[in-house]
Amino acid sequence: MNKATTGNKRYPASEIIKRYRGVGLFITGTGTDIGKTTITAALAAAFRQLGLVVGVCKPINTGCPVRPDHAGGQATGNDDLIASDATILARAAGLTNNLDSLLPVLSPIRYCVPVSPHLAARMERRKPDWRRVAAALEYWQSRCDILLVEGAGGWKVPIDTAAPFAIGDMAAKIGLPVLIVAGCYVGTINHTWLTVQAVRQSRVPIFGIVANRRPATPDFGAMTSTDSLGKVTGVPLLATLPDTPFDDKDGIPSALVQTMLPVARKYWKQAKRPR
Ligand SMILES: Nc1ncnc2c1ncn2[C@@H]1O[C@H](COP(=O)(O)OP(=O)(O)OP(=O)(O)O)[C@@H](O)[C@H]1O
Ligand SMILES: [Mg+2]
């Protein structure tokens, strides 16, 4: 495997994170806020409708507010911060019992500042504790039929610039096939194709692309760009999700879950096929 694209061997995560040996998907996106949590949650709910036990994990989450029950003073560790994305994922996966005790395996590394992990780690003077990520993956190994892992930002978001080590390097270590979340706008072809190229360079298999937030009133440029994603990149465009405004506290709209259901069915069918 290409050293330059899989992260420097000296970076601690390279030694600590082990390949996930079960069935799962790593959900990345063409950028931050593109809809990874929403799609991962919709997918989790869809897999549950197929009768599967779903595990979810957001290994690194920045922009996590301090827990209201934190004792005061400066938050100093992962567990002092709210696991923002993982809480949404956990709810969709039906993991609300004992949520508090599950948080370390749902969201092992948390930072408060809403920036790239390498900057958050520097600003908060705390390196990622990779043993927590390894422990989370180990936990899910024997406790779910399918594990959904959400990245942070996009494939090339740095975790450590000196090593160098990025989200894509972490994903390559975990070794799960990738689902790419893209947008529906003029310019999505370039962003999506660049992401596809980067994932391919890391030699990680790509399951497909999901285009998120199709506008209610289709715009010619946005729709033709979105419709071209499969053909241009050579990666199947599996679904296009409509823009469906919702409040996180109400859970993922069922229209989004139903759109992801055929994607879940397709993945489960191919994942269970003997290799
Ligand atoms: N299909 C959709 N319709 C309407 N709103 C959406 C849709 N998908 C995502 N959103 C909204 O867009 C915002 C960003 O989505 P989301 O949190 O899923 O992005 P993300 O890629 O996970 O972001 P991050 O990089 O911070 O993890 C959220 O407020 C979410 O509710
Ligand atoms: Mg997210």
Image (cartoon, rainbow, N blue to C red):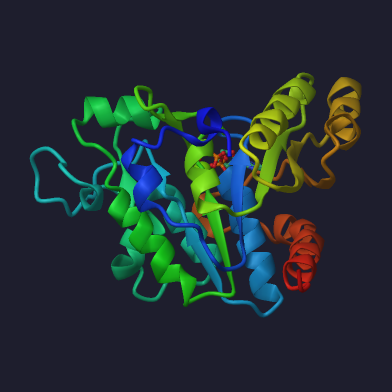
Picture quarter with the C terminus? bottom right
> Where is residue 253, by image quadrant?
bottom right
Q: Residue at x 47, y 77 (%)?
A: 142
Query: Left or right: 110 with respect to 137?
Result: left
**Is 62 placed above or below 255 here?**
above
Q: Position of residue 16 (x, y in %)?
A: 35, 51
Q: Residue at x 81, y 37 (%)?
A: 216
Front-lying residue, 37 or 169 = 169
Front-lying residue, 164 or 185 = 164
Q: Position of residue 134 (x, y in %)?
A: 37, 57
Query: Left or right: 69 with respect to 177?
Result: left
**Is 72 placed above or below 122 here?**
below
Q: Position of residue 56 (x, y in %)?
A: 50, 61
The answer to whether residue 213 is visible is yes
Q: Residue at x 79, y 20 (%)?
A: 186
Picture quarter with the N terminus? top right
**Is 50 placed above or below 223 here?**
below
How many labels sit on residues?
A: 0
Q: Position of residue 97 (x, y in %)?
A: 39, 76
Q: Residue at x 21, y 36 (%)?
A: 126
Front-lying residue, 174 or 240 = 174
The answer to whether residue 152 is visible is no
Query: Left or right: 167 with respect to 217?
Result: left
Front-lying residue, 264 or 201 = 201
Query: Left or right: 96 with respect to 12?
Result: right
